[in-house]
Amino acid sequence: MADTLAGMRKSAGIALLATRMNFRSHLVHPGEVLLANIGALVQAVSGAAVFMLALSASDGIHGWTLAEWAALTGFTTVARALWNTVFFGTLDIPDMVRSGELDHYLVRPANPLMLILFSKVDTDVWIEIAVGTGMLGVALHVGGAELSGPVLLFIPLALAGSALVFAAMHLAVTALSFWLRQDAMLSMLIWRLDTFAQLPMSFYPKWLMTVFSTVVPFAFVGYFPCLYILGRTDSPFVWLLPLAGPLLFLPAVLLWRSGIDRYSSTGS
Amino acid sequence: MTGTLRRGWRTQQAIAGMQMKLAFHYRTRAFAQGIGALLLIGLQVALWSAVYAGGDGQVRAGGLTLHQTTVYAAAGTVWVLCLPGLALARQLETKIRDGRIVSELLLPTGFLTQWFSAAIGRTAGVTVLVGVPASIAGAAVLHPFTLDPAHVGRLMLTTAIAFVVLFDFSYLIGLSAFFIRRVEGLNEVREALLLLLGGSMMPISLYPAGLRDAALWTPFVHGFYTPLGTLVRDPFVDDRVVALGACWAVLLSAAAVLCTRAALRKLVIAGG
């Protein structure tokens, strides 16, 4: 037990050090950080504007107002940005496996997954967090949602859980590269699909909603938590939703470990 | 055709052919892209069905029916996969950053034409491997769909313009790696503008009139809206819009030539 705790403390220390170093290396070129954030801002605003233009063609979509949809978009934007802040490095796993670069992490005296997680930071996400939070706040205000104490407590918990759902999906998919040896094959699918997590799941036919609630659990990223935040449900079970992230992340880590066990380097 | 021209033509053909073979080498990736495209088409159909549901029947602001809009969105999904995009800019950026670009300058071809031929080859490969099967499967879902023979010529012209415009955008962004360290920000701006003003997800004709008319003057619409609008016979894609697209293709190509000259002058070979 003491050894485990010491190991965790050591990994946390390394993670902190790596993150600080990564941020500093980005800030050596502040103009490029600014440009990347402007790019992320334009993309976030454009994506929202296009969906809004599409949805404004109807008075209400499957019972959702534009304000409610904007709150869902803001929420998922923040959750995705939070995932991107910490777990960005996992996207490189397929390339690392293919090129043998993973060896560098395996020979270091620290948890390799922890090292990969904190090997990169994405500084473009700052603006996404700001835009998403602003969008969520304004939409809740305009939509007249009741922000009670429990809802305010629920939002950060749900955001952390949602970020972990994203992390679990991407880690599971990238860990498959130990078996498939293909670069970012399935990861690309998840990337393409996650834009649609910003839409109310009631849009989709039932079979698709079942897929989004089970196989590719995008419904846990924004739709289910927002049902409670928007006052569309008062079921006490919503408090279990933030646990979806950790519960999904655990098998993803096990899959990663299983992959590491069968990993044989390219030898290059 | 003179000997020099013939040799140049053969070289470009060889470059395009090599890229086409390379596209076929990554079959599993292409398969995943195809499946992803079909899933996205399904999601697009669900989205637009929801948007049009409960309306006045079929026709919306831009004069497009639900069927036309879904065909537009589905074709746009396949379009993104096949035409030059992020991959080209990133490839160029990586080669500039790690110095591999130098070996390309030793080849007996022009730098810009070489990348253009490579883009044509890759597009042809991905179109055969992913675009055609995904289009056939998508067309089965969106049946019935007919293409007026009178529109075929215009569709080919607007497709060629779209290719040149999208290539030039990606090439110019990739080339900017000679001047800045990371081009990701520019890439994101390009994606966003293609999404909002280019109609990569929905037809511009569904926008409010002011925004639609302003967007028609930008180069972005000619990457997606003009060819896809021609495909679904969008009434807003008229001769004036196509002519404007041709002008943008020429202007952007001229900018690509000038930027290539300026960028290559910045190249410093350390001699290592």
Image (cartoon, coloured by chain):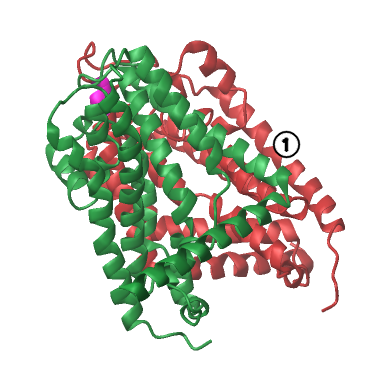
Chain colours: A green, B red
Look at the image and tell me whether residue A241 can be seen.
yes
Quadrant location of residue A154?
top left
Tag 1 subunit = B
Q: Residue furthest front?
A: A2
B253 lies left or right of A264: right
In front: A188, or A170?
A170
Q: Position of residue A78 (x, y in %)?
A: 42, 37
Per the image, the residue denoted by label 1 is B251
**Position in image of residue A109 (x %, y %):** 49, 79
| Total count of labels | 1
At 39% across and 85% down in the image, what residue appears?
A264
Q: Is residue A67 above or below residue A87?
A: above
Outermost residue, bottom side: A267
Residue closest to the eye, B195 or B220: B195
Which of the pair B79/A221 is nearer the observer?
A221
Q: Residue at x 32, y 24 (%)?
A: A69
Q: Position of residue A82 (x, y in %)?
A: 44, 45
Q: Which residues are magenta?
A: B48-52
Is A242 on the left-hand or right-hand side of B173?
left
Residue at point 31% right, 62% down?
A172
**Amino acid type of the residue tagged 1 in the rendering:** Leu
Q: Residues within 10 Å of mark 1 (few under 14, many from 20)?
A: some
- Would you place residue A191 above or below residue A222 in this image? below
**Toward the viewer: A150 or A202?**
A150
